């Protein structure tokens, strides 16, 4: 899954290089979705004279990619923490309490 690779990229130092065809395909998907900035080979059929495919170079994760990571949950991850709001009347009472001179 491409999101697994995006999570791996977020935990590693960039730029990163990937050379297997499966990884290159995942990088191309992430780049097409606008989640990473990457340099990828032109096509899978484009072979170098030594009959090996080029490598994909991931330069950075975009802001959109970071937002997707924050929104995407993986199996086994802890559920996101919900922010608790203080009722307005408690906030008002607390503010009034701090305004008093000691």
Image: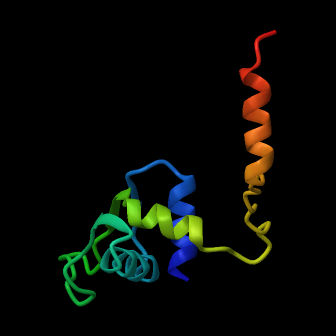
Residue ID at (18%, 77%): 49
> Closest to the observer: 17 or 7?
7
> Closest to the observer: 71 or 62?
71
Question: In the image, is 56 to the left or to the right of 73?
Answer: left
Question: In the image, is 57 to the left or to the right of 65?
Answer: left
- Quadrant position of residue 20: bottom left
> Where is residue 21 shown, x and y percent of the image?
40, 82
- Quadrant position of residue 83: bottom right
Residue ID at (39%, 76%): 30
**Extreme bottom residue here?**
45
Location of the N terminus (image quadrant): bottom right
Location of the C terminus (image quadrant): top right
Question: In the image, is 9 to the left or to the right of 43?
Answer: right
> Where is residue 12 shown, x and y percent of the image?
53, 52
**Extreme top residue here?**
102
Instruction: Give the colour scheme of this rendering.
Output: rainbow
- State whether residue 52 is above or below residue 57: below
Residue ID at (55%, 67%): 69
- State whether residue 101 is above or below residue 65: above
- Quadrant position of residue 58: bottom left
> Closest to the observer: 14 or 19?
14
């Amino acid at each position: 899954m491409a999101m697994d690779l995006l999570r791996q990229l977020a935990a590693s130092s960039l730029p990163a290089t990937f050379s297997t065809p499966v990884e290159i395909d995942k990088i191309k998907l992430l780049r097409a979705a606008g989640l990473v900035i990457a340099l990828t080979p032109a096509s899978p059929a484009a072979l170098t004279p030594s009959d090996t495919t080029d490598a994909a170079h991931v330069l950075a994760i975009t802001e959109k990619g970071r937002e997707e990571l924050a929104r995407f949950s993986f199996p086994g991850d802890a559920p996101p923490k919900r922010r608790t709001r203080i009722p307005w009347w408690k906030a008002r009472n607390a503010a009034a309490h701090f305004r008093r001179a000691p």
